Image (cartoon, rainbow, N blue to C red):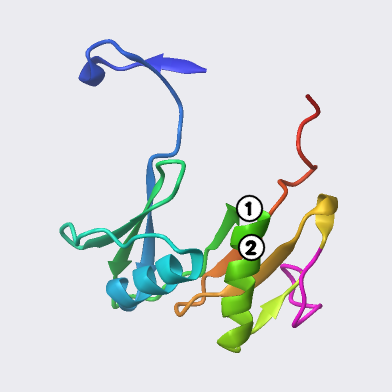
Amino acid sequence: MEVSGDAYGGILLAVELNHTIVHSRDNRESAEFFAELLELEVGPEWGPFVPVVLSNGITLDFASTEQHIAPQHYAFLVSEDEFAAAYAKISQRGLAHWADPHRKHPGTVNHNDGGSGVYFLDPNGHQLELLTVPYGGWPEQ
């Protein structure tokens, strides 16, 4: 689906996620936790946000709040090498992690769709998921 936008001079744009706000107790700490784990860069603070840009251009804008934080789920498709490096950090830090979103298989990873996957919590209770193969597997070519 494409939409036209007068704000973009009539340029036709496909609908894409551009950014999302990730609520946290400490925006800098949360951005650094995430960025260090996945070897990404923390951007300069912009207003109330500390951004981390993903390789596909989507920005996670970490924002501090003193209000209740409703835990969210964020899933990231990563390469096998990125998964191995991140999982080594998860293990070295002693972070609780699970092979499943219901936390019935602690301390291990899954191999769904022929890849690797793991669930763990960030400092604010958001459930992060790393997977190397999308749900349902890679499309046939």
Residues 118 and 20: in front is 118
**Residue 101 bears which disc, if any?**
none
Q: Quadrant of residue 14?
A: top left
User: Residue 75: x percent and y percent?
Assistant: 59, 56
Which label sits on residue 79?
A: 1
Residue at image coords 64%, 83%: 91
**Residue 103 is inside the magenta segment:** yes
Q: Residue at x 44, y 39 (%)?
A: 17
Amino acid type indicated by mark 1: Ser
Residues at badges 1 and 2 in contact (C-beta under 8 Å)?
yes
Question: Is 27 left, or right, of 125 in this rendering?
Answer: left
Residue 95 in sight in this render: no
Q: Which mark is residue 83?
A: 2
Q: Above or below — where is 25 with respect to 75?
A: below
Expressed as whole percent of the image width and height from the top left, the position of residue 123 reads 46, 80
Residue 132 colored in magenta in the image: no
Amino acid of disc 2: Phe
Segment colored magenta:
100-110
Measured Cα–Cα span from mark 1 to mark 2: 6 Å
User: Who is closer to the viewer here, 80 or 95?
Assistant: 80
Most frequent secondary structure within the magenta stretch: loop
